[in-house]
Image (cartoon, rainbow, N blue to C red):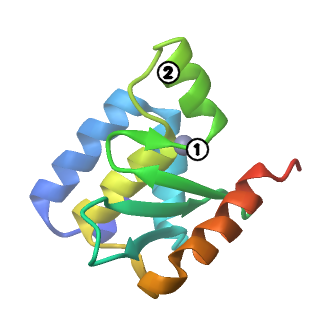
Amino acid sequence: MMGTYTDEEAKRYLKRLEEKYGSRFKRAMKAVEEGRVFRIKREYSKVDIWLVYGSKGKPYLVIPDKFCTCRDFYLNVLVRRKVDLCYHILAQKIALRIGKYKEIAIDPLEDYKFFGKIISEIMKRK
Ligand SMILES: [Zn+2]
């Protein structure tokens, strides 16, 4: 899987993340490989927001290095302080580093609708 990246520096970067995050790294890499990582293009805003879809299609909003809407982030990062990030944030970092993500452009006047839809997806109990 990692052999597809010829950039030696990127390989070393991924290796370090793998050693540090283990199973979270594997899930993150899978999300990147499967094209589940999206950057939301909002040129009118300085807040960089990403969308990472879980393996079952549930969306998670990610603010790089800072926040994710998933349960793992809430429990293990915020409450228990066991780790410093969840696999969605990790997927975002990897995707950005190796340039493997898609962009979603949204109309500035319609972004409340876009986020409203995403948030209702996040709130759904499955
Ligand atoms: Zn997360």
Name, please, the residue furthest toward the front.
Answer: 109
* Label 1 SS: loop
Front one among 57 and 60:
60
Quadrant of residue 39 in the image? Answer: bottom left
Residue 92 is labelled as none
**Viewport quadrant of the N terminus:** bottom left
Is residue 119 something that shows in the picture?
yes
- Residue at image position (40%, 46%) is 90
> Which residue has dot 2 on it?
78
**Please, what is the three-letter code of the amino acid marked with disc 1?**
Thr
In what quadrant does ligand 1 lie? top right
Residue 69 is labelled as 1
- Residue at image position (67%, 58%) is 119
- Residue at image position (58%, 44%) is 69
Q: Is residue 34 left or right of residue 104?
A: right
| Label 2 Cα crowd, 10 Å radius (few <14 / some 14-19 / many 20+) | some
* Label 2 SS: helix
Quadrant of residue 108 in the image? Answer: bottom left
Q: Is residue 8 above or below residue 107?
A: above
- Residue at image position (38%, 56%) is 92
